Image: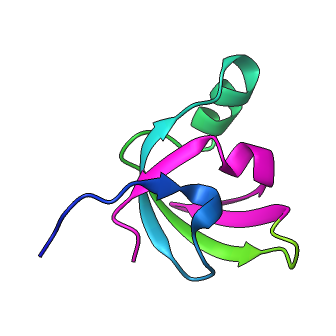
């Protein structure tokens, strides 16, 4: 039973794995995210969410990055498990 459910990266929980569907960032931020491998089709693992959910630590391939909530809310994901 596989159906596409889209959500924002900021809604993922610790240990969750998701696939990037769309990045709604613009300009330099979008280029920075792409340079880390965060692009459509990439698999993302949520390593940590700050207690206030203001920061997120994610892993894309062998790269670990930290995102602010505003940045995580610009990333649409699917197949969250």
Is residue 70 part of the magenta span, yes or no? yes
Q: Report x, y in % for residue 58.
A: 65, 64
Q: Quadrant of residue 80?
A: bottom left
Task: Estimate the x, y position of residue 26 in percent, counting from the top left.
Answer: 66, 21
Residue in the picture at 57% in, 31% down: 24
Q: Relative to residue 47, is residue 56 drawn left or right? A: right
User: Does the rendering let one see residue 32?
Assistant: yes
Q: Residue furthest top?
A: 27
Q: Is residue 24 left or right of residue 51?
A: left
Vertical relation: 49 (above or below) 72:
below
Residue 61 image offset from top left, x and y in percent: 50, 60
Give me the residue at 73% from left, 44% from top.
Answer: 71
- Point out the image quarter for the C terminus: bottom left
Residue at (74% x, 21% y) in the render: 28
* On screen, residue 35 above or below 60: above
Please check the rendered image and state whether residue 76 is part of the magenta-colored stretch, yes or no. yes
Q: Is residue 63 visible?
A: no
* Front one among 63 and 7: 7
Q: Which residues are magenta?
A: 54-81
Q: Residue at x 39, y 54 (%)?
A: 6
Q: Is residue 4 left or right of residue 7?
A: left
Q: Is residue 33 above or below residue 8?
A: above
How many numbered circles does the render carry?
Answer: 0
Q: Residue furthest left?
A: 1
x and y percent of residue 38 in the render?
A: 55, 44
Quadrant for the N terminus in the image: bottom left
């Amino acid at each position: 039973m596989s159906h596409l459910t889209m959500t924002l990266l900021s809604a993922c929980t610790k240990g969750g794995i998701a696939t990037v569907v769309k990045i709604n960032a613009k300009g330099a931020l979008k280029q920075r995210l792409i340079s880390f491998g965060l692009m459509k089709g990439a698999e993302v693992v949520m390593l940590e969410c700050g207690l206030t959910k203001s920061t997120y630590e994610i892993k894309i391939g062998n790269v670990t990055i930290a995102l602010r909530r505003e940045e995580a809310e610009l990333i649409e994901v699917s197949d969250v498990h």
